[in-house]
Amino acid sequence: MSNEQPEPEHLHFWSFIDHAIERTSRELPGIDPLAMRLVLTLHRAANMLVYDLESTVHRPRGWSWPGFRVLFVIWLSAPVEARKVAELSGMSRAAVSALVNTLERDGLVSKERAPYDGRAVQLRLTDAGLEAITSAFRSHNEREQEWAGSLSAEEQKTLIDLLAKLTAHSTHFDARHRA
Amino acid sequence: MSNEQPEPEHLHFWSFIDHAIERTSRELPGIDPLAMRLVLTLHRAANMLVYDLESTVHRPRGWSWPGFRVLFVIWLSAPVEARKVAELSGMSRAAVSALVNTLERDGLVSKERAPYDGRAVQLRLTDAGLEAITSAFRSHNEREQEWAGSLSAEEQKTLIDLLAKLTAHSTHFDARHRA
DNA sequence: AGGTTGTAATCAAAGCTTTGATTAATTGGT
DNA sequence: ACCAATTAATCAAAGCTTTGATTACAACCT
């Protein structure tokens, strides 16, 4: 395995996946290049999407993508326990706890002890939080439409079905998940 | 918009996307539910994949997914400037700078000033870094095969093509990207 | 009632990421 | 030769995330 390829100038963002697959499957036996391309492509697509939505929709409003996700879940299920927000959003409980602190500091979320269980905390949106999430959500969905518009409705459905199948089957080989 | 739905106990990870789409498209006119489902499904699939790979392959070896990504890029393009690593991996230059510091501290990467440009830094793997990345990459690809195995080869190709189309077309509506 | 076990939330330490500012070196125009 | 504009890397501050430990409360069992 040589580290002395002298021409990384010829590598670019769009060609790197091809290069990586060519190089690794040539040099390492037993690699599955299709699985590798699937994971690299999926990760890159999600990253680009998140970066674009965060920088065009959320940061200009003064908040983050994780903050949006938490507000979104609380909006659709309030009053809701912090534990549930973690489950629904796919975050850890500690991450939700930290995030809710900043959202509470910014006046978007209110927190109070559950009357039926002294351990649990119930979360709700404040009026400002409700105003913020509905406005941001519209803008967010407009941007989602820009992205989805790359594909026909049929293609979008196919993509959704394949992704759903991928995640559904992850339960068949004991994929690790949070909590 | 009522926040007083009293039964978030009936919401669960797998049904939340359906609930969110039903609720938002009922209450907010002009929302595109298909675009929304596409983005939610894509984000969730990528998150689950990353979480599983990181917790089964990388953390047990004592490193992180971002560390793996940087080692991977350096492996396939060394000697390479930090700026190029940022471009190829889709990270910011500052993130690469910070990450390379920890990889250097851990003895996996070496850093030296480029002879032809006093600003640039050239990165290479150390022997330990090369050993680490080849071993981790095999294990990583085995896990990728578990995930990809949920789909037939034809389905995998279709999924890759649709994701590639999505990202390729992102250039047509001035999607924001790093650097 | 008392004690064990389990669960919700939070804390602590470490790491990654972001934006914006700073430093240093190169390039290009005059 | 000189000065302005770029460019590479890094720094600084703030925020998010992770794992593992801690605190507080609840449930169960005898």
Image (cartoon, coloured by chain):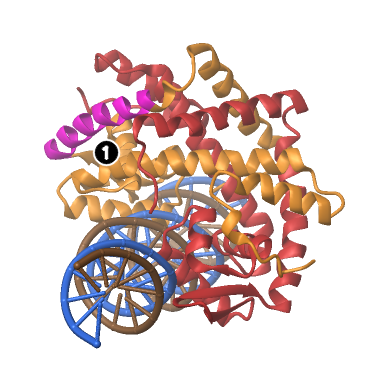
Chain colours: A red, B orange, C blue, D brown
Instruction: Tell me if I can see residue A13 in this picture.
Output: no
Position of residue D1 measured from the top left corner of the image (x, y, whole percent)? 43, 61
The secondary structure that dominates the magenta segment is helix
Chain ID, mark 1 = B
Q: Secondary structure at mark 1?
A: helix
Side of B3 where B118 appears, left or right: left
Q: Residue B177 in the image: x percent, y percent?
A: 58, 46
At label 1, counting other C-alpha atoms closer than 10 Å, the crowd grade (few under 14, some 14-19, many 20 or more) is many
Q: Nearer the viewer, residue A106 or A13?
A: A106
Q: From the top left corner, tell me how far across and down residue B170 is, in percent.
A: 67, 37
Question: In the rendered view, would you say B179 is above or below B98?
Answer: above
Q: Which residue is mark 1?
A: B57
- Look at the image and tell me in which quarter the N terminus of chain A lies: top left
- Queried whether the magenta region covers residue B136, the answer comes back as yes
Q: Amino acid at mark 1?
A: Val
Q: Is residue A166 visible?
A: yes
The stretch of residues the image draws in magenta is B126-146
Position of residue A103 relative to residue B84, above or below, is: below
Q: Nearer the viewer, residue A37 or B80?
A: A37
